Image (spheres, rainbow, N blue to C red):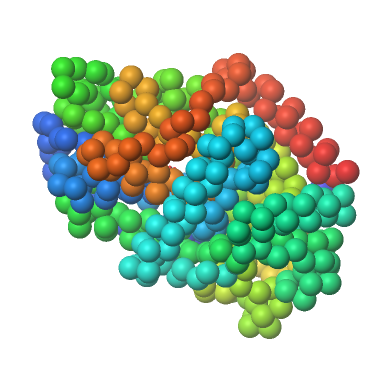
Amino acid sequence: MSMPAILSASYREVCMWQEQVPRDDRAVGDLPDGVDVLVVGAGYCGLGAADGAASAGADVLVLDKEPLGWGASSRNGGMVIPELKAGPEKLAKKIGDLAHRLYEEVEEAFDHTEDLVAQMDCDYRRSGQLYLAHTPRHTPYLRDLAAELQRSGQAVHFLDAAAVTARTGSTAFDSAIFYEKVGGLHPAKFHDGMAKRALAAGAAVHDRTGVTGIRSRAGGFEVETTRGRVRASQVIVGTNAYMDSAVPDLAKRILPINSYIIATEPLTQEQRDVIGPQMMVDTKNLLFYWRLTADGRMIFGGRNRLDPVDIPVARDFLYDNMVRIHPQLQGVAIDYAWTGFVAMTLDRLPHVGTIDGVWYATGCNGTGVSLNGWLGHRLGHVVTGQAPPPAFAELKHPSIPLKPLSPSYVPLVGRYFALQDRR
Ligand SMILES: Cc1cc2nc3c(=O)[nH]c(=O)nc-3n(C[C@H](O)[C@H](O)[C@H](O)COP(=O)(O)OP(=O)(O)OC[C@H]3O[C@@H](n4cnc5c(N)ncnc54)[C@H](O)[C@@H]3O)c2cc1C
């Protein structure tokens, strides 16, 4: 049982970032009869795609079934991380030279994101990241991974327990890798900045307008929406974990899993100084991720199982662990708790491809702040003939086995992961 979290008088179960960036209703005006490029989903991916295609002069329409800024792009931890789950050498053993090209694109995505954030106000800071061994058993793995990453030219440093404590004030970790090339931002401000870019490039964005079906027709597609039919020469789908039956074959390849976040009240300067500005994530299967925000709060995210739980259950679990890791936060109250979906894939890699001529990018596996926006941007270039598909399109994208039965087996996988994490 988790210790109940201390809640502030203003505690609410809403996403803090979304509250801090109010949006206008964009479901105004009629939809056009036809466009060059129709984009489904107005998260980082869809807006990146719109920016990429509209900047080339294409007539672009972005549709989102929810209010603008509702999806994962305004709910996440705001960590800008150029990584894939496996290191470059391990991945190369599985997929050969393609692994190196994927890593080049991950780096390109990060650089692209840093270019974007330099042109907008989204509290970005290149603060670095600690990847922390939650058990001594993981220290040899981190030592090997640091060496592998250094061989591939990445600016990383292996830290022992004392060095971790000096940086974070926490004694909960046996070792860590410090990644220099990682940053943190305000996800909803970044999303708002991307929406403004897409609009400035000439794209039309309509929210509260769901796509319910996409059919091939001569010279393109006929897209059925909740507000009428639109013809499009090209369609890009950027729905990530929030995909529905609009593209049924895509839904078979993604497993949406909840991730939960709590945000504390603003901390004292002394508490902030001890914890430090870096992004933090541990080595568990069901990992924790946490960081300070620009307004001096701690946000602490993760999950203790793979099947959904009520927010208060997740909140108390996260609070308990936050205070265990940073005892200096004992007594600090929580202002917000919320959840969102991340899109897991079988190989834990992001995927790009076409289904019946419709382009898509999906499968963030929890790290899509820079990659999904860049993949979208690149797809905007692909459909307007400015660039070839990214190397991610060369990966096979397998379906999730027995996807309709996932509500029965996913909890069991979660329990197995949790047991492994305790060892
Ligand atoms: C709690 C949480 C924490 C995270 N932390 C991090 C982090 O720190 N760092 C990191 O790199 N990544 C993180 N991620 C992942 C990251 O947020 C995502 O990878 C990224 O936001 C995905 O962007 P997207 O545009 O592909 O999808 P989204 O932002 O989810 O947008 C998809 C949109 O598609 C719309 N849609 C779906 N179906 C339809 C339809 N039929 N018609 C019209 N619209 C439709 C949805 O309404 C939604 O707005 C986190 C995710 C969550 C949930």
Judge by depth and name the residue closer to the eye, 396 or 259. Answer: 396
Identified at 29% across, 38% down, the residue is 382
Residue lying farthest to the bottom in this orientation: 270
Q: Position of residue 229 (x, y in %)?
A: 18, 26
The answer to which quarter of the image holds residue 242 is top left
Judge by depth and name the residue closer to the eye, 334 or 293. Answer: 293
Res. 206 visible in picture: no
Q: Position of residue 415 (x, y in %)?
A: 77, 33
The reply, left or right, for residue 200 in relation to residue 108 is left
Identified at 27% across, 50% down, the residue is 51
Res. 123 visible in picture: yes
Quadrant of image for the C terminus: top right
The reply, left or right, for residue 203 in relation to residue 177 is left
The answer to which quarter of the image holds residue 175 is bottom right
Q: Position of residue 106 (x, y in %)?
A: 50, 49
Compared with 214, 26 (above or below) is below
Identified at 44% across, 25% down, the residue is 250
